[in-house]
Image (cartoon, grey):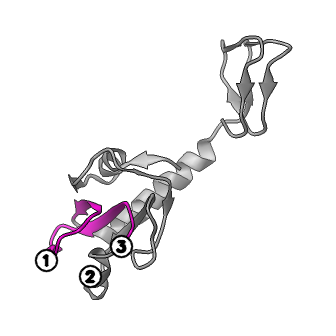
Amino acid sequence: MHFTAAQIATIINGNIEGDAGTPVTSFGRIEDAEKGQLAFLSNPKYEEFLYNTKASIVIINEQQEIRQPITTTVIKVPDAYSAFALLLDKYQQIQRQQLHGIQEPSHIAATAKIGENVFIGAFAYLGEHVIVGNGQ
Protein backbone atom coordinates (compact mmCIF):
# COMPACT_ATOMS: atom_id res chain seq x y z
CA MET A 1 0.00 0.00 0.00
CA HIS A 2 1.26 3.47 -0.83
CA PHE A 3 -1.19 6.38 -0.72
CA THR A 4 -0.92 10.11 -0.15
CA ALA A 5 -3.26 12.19 1.98
CA ALA A 6 -4.72 13.64 -1.23
CA GLN A 7 -5.53 10.19 -2.61
CA ILE A 8 -7.10 9.08 0.66
CA ALA A 9 -9.14 12.28 0.94
CA THR A 10 -10.47 11.69 -2.57
CA ILE A 11 -11.56 8.14 -1.73
CA ILE A 12 -13.31 9.11 1.52
CA ASN A 13 -14.42 12.60 0.44
CA GLY A 14 -12.52 14.34 3.22
CA ASN A 15 -10.86 17.70 3.77
CA ILE A 16 -7.12 17.80 4.38
CA GLU A 17 -5.45 19.94 7.03
CA GLY A 18 -1.71 19.67 6.54
CA ASP A 19 0.45 18.29 3.74
CA ALA A 20 -1.64 16.70 0.97
CA GLY A 21 1.45 14.88 -0.27
CA THR A 22 2.06 13.04 3.00
CA PRO A 23 2.49 9.32 2.19
CA VAL A 24 1.41 6.27 4.17
CA THR A 25 2.19 2.62 3.59
CA SER A 26 0.20 0.87 6.33
CA PHE A 27 -2.47 1.21 8.98
CA GLY A 28 -1.97 1.66 12.73
CA ARG A 29 -3.87 2.38 15.91
CA ILE A 30 -3.69 6.05 16.86
CA GLU A 31 -2.13 5.25 20.23
CA ASP A 32 0.85 3.33 18.80
CA ALA A 33 1.02 4.23 15.12
CA GLU A 34 4.40 5.03 13.59
CA LYS A 35 5.54 7.41 10.88
CA GLY A 36 4.24 6.21 7.52
CA GLN A 37 1.03 4.85 9.00
CA LEU A 38 -2.60 5.94 8.76
CA ALA A 39 -4.81 5.99 11.86
CA PHE A 40 -8.26 7.29 12.74
CA LEU A 41 -9.91 8.96 15.71
CA SER A 42 -13.65 8.56 16.14
CA ASN A 43 -14.06 8.08 19.89
CA PRO A 44 -13.46 11.27 21.93
CA LYS A 45 -11.93 9.27 24.79
CA TYR A 46 -8.87 8.70 22.55
CA GLU A 47 -8.44 12.40 21.75
CA GLU A 48 -5.26 12.67 23.86
CA PHE A 49 -3.48 10.40 21.34
CA LEU A 50 -4.13 12.89 18.52
CA TYR A 51 -1.59 15.26 20.08
CA ASN A 52 1.28 12.79 20.37
CA THR A 53 0.64 10.15 17.70
CA LYS A 54 3.45 9.42 15.31
CA ALA A 55 0.96 8.50 12.57
CA SER A 56 1.61 10.45 9.38
CA ILE A 57 -2.12 10.85 8.66
CA VAL A 58 -5.11 10.67 10.99
CA ILE A 59 -8.74 10.60 9.85
CA ILE A 60 -10.94 12.55 12.29
CA ASN A 61 -14.56 13.67 12.59
CA GLU A 62 -15.40 17.12 11.24
CA GLN A 63 -16.70 18.10 14.68
CA GLN A 64 -13.40 17.18 16.37
CA GLU A 65 -11.93 20.33 17.88
CA ILE A 66 -8.14 20.42 17.79
CA ARG A 67 -7.14 21.92 21.14
CA GLN A 68 -3.34 21.62 20.93
CA PRO A 69 -0.70 21.76 18.19
CA ILE A 70 -0.37 18.54 16.18
CA THR A 71 2.34 17.32 13.86
CA THR A 72 0.27 14.94 11.76
CA THR A 73 -1.75 15.61 8.63
CA VAL A 74 -5.47 15.21 9.34
CA ILE A 75 -8.34 14.40 7.03
CA LYS A 76 -11.70 15.60 8.33
CA VAL A 77 -14.83 13.65 7.43
CA PRO A 78 -18.40 13.51 8.79
CA ASP A 79 -17.80 10.08 10.37
CA ALA A 80 -14.18 8.93 10.85
CA TYR A 81 -15.12 5.35 11.72
CA SER A 82 -17.21 4.89 8.55
CA ALA A 83 -14.59 6.62 6.41
CA PHE A 84 -11.85 4.33 7.73
CA ALA A 85 -14.05 1.27 7.09
CA LEU A 86 -14.70 2.50 3.53
CA LEU A 87 -10.98 3.01 2.98
CA LEU A 88 -10.21 -0.52 4.21
CA ASP A 89 -12.85 -1.91 1.86
CA LYS A 90 -11.43 0.01 -1.12
CA TYR A 91 -7.92 -1.16 -0.23
CA GLN A 92 -9.08 -4.79 -0.15
CA GLN A 93 -10.74 -4.33 -3.54
CA ILE A 94 -7.50 -2.97 -4.97
CA GLN A 95 -5.56 -5.90 -3.51
CA ARG A 96 -7.96 -8.40 -5.10
CA GLN A 97 -7.64 -6.67 -8.47
CA GLN A 98 -3.84 -6.79 -8.51
CA LEU A 99 -2.87 -8.43 -11.76
CA HIS A 100 -0.10 -10.99 -12.16
CA GLY A 101 1.49 -12.63 -15.17
CA ILE A 102 2.55 -11.62 -18.63
CA GLN A 103 0.04 -10.47 -21.22
CA GLU A 104 0.63 -11.04 -24.90
CA PRO A 105 1.79 -9.61 -27.13
CA SER A 106 4.88 -8.42 -25.30
CA HIS A 107 8.62 -8.59 -25.88
CA ILE A 108 10.97 -9.76 -23.15
CA ALA A 109 14.67 -9.96 -23.98
CA ALA A 110 16.43 -13.21 -23.13
CA THR A 111 18.72 -11.39 -20.66
CA ALA A 112 15.84 -9.70 -18.82
CA LYS A 113 15.18 -10.91 -15.27
CA ILE A 114 11.63 -11.02 -13.95
CA GLY A 115 10.80 -11.42 -10.26
CA GLU A 116 7.86 -13.19 -8.69
CA ASN A 117 4.28 -11.87 -8.57
CA VAL A 118 4.77 -9.34 -11.36
CA PHE A 119 2.45 -8.04 -14.03
CA ILE A 120 3.71 -7.20 -17.50
CA GLY A 121 0.99 -5.68 -19.65
CA ALA A 122 0.32 -6.28 -23.31
CA PHE A 123 2.65 -4.46 -25.71
CA ALA A 124 5.34 -4.09 -23.03
CA TYR A 125 8.96 -4.12 -24.20
CA LEU A 126 11.63 -5.28 -21.76
CA GLY A 127 15.03 -4.78 -23.30
CA GLU A 128 18.38 -6.41 -22.62
CA HIS A 129 19.40 -6.73 -18.94
CA VAL A 130 16.20 -5.19 -17.60
CA ILE A 131 15.35 -6.30 -14.07
CA VAL A 132 11.77 -6.32 -12.78
CA GLY A 133 11.70 -6.85 -9.02
CA ASN A 134 9.29 -9.00 -7.05
CA GLY A 135 5.76 -7.63 -6.86
CA GLN A 136 6.38 -4.86 -9.40
For the residues marked 1 and 3, what is the alpha-carbon distance in whole angstroms?
Answer: 15 Å
Q: Could you tell me if the residues under marks 3 and 2 are in contact, i.e. CB atoms within 8 Å?
A: no
Which residue: 45% across, 57% down? Answer: 36
**Mark number for residue 53?**
3
Q: Quadrant of residue 130?
A: top right
Q: The magenta stretch spans which residues? A: 54-77
Q: Earlier in the sequence, mark 1 or mark 2?
A: 2
The residue pinned by badge 2 equals 47
> Is 128 situated above or below 27?
above
Image location (x, y in percent) of residue 121: 65, 22
Q: Is residue 65 left or right of residue 80?
A: left
Q: Is residue 4 left or right of residue 79?
A: right
Image location (x, y in percent) of residue 1: 53, 50
Which residue: 77% across, 11% down? Answer: 128
Q: Amino acid at mark 1?
A: Arg
Image location (x, y in percent) of residue 44: 25, 84
Q: Amino acid at mark 3?
A: Thr
For the residues marked 1 and 2, what is the alpha-carbon distance in whole angstroms?
Answer: 10 Å
Residue neighbourhood size for the residue with mark 2, other residues' Cα within 10 Å, grouped as few (<14), some (14–19), many (≥20) = some
Closer-to-camera residue (112/77): 112
> Is 117 situated above or below 13?
above
Residue 53 lies in the magenta stretch:
no
Could you tell me which secondary element the residue under label 1 belongs to? loop
Q: Could you tell me if the residues under marks 1 and 2 are in contact, i.e. CB atoms within 8 Å?
A: yes
Residue 74 lies in the magenta stretch:
yes
The residue pinned by badge 1 equals 67
**Mark number for residue 100?**
none
Residue neighbourhood size for the residue with mark 3, other residues' Cα within 10 Å, grouped as few (<14), some (14–19), many (≥20) = many
Q: Amino acid at mark 2?
A: Glu
Could you tell me which secondary element the residue under label 3 belongs to? loop
> Is 118 situated above or below 43?
above
Which residue: 27% across, 64% down? Answer: 71
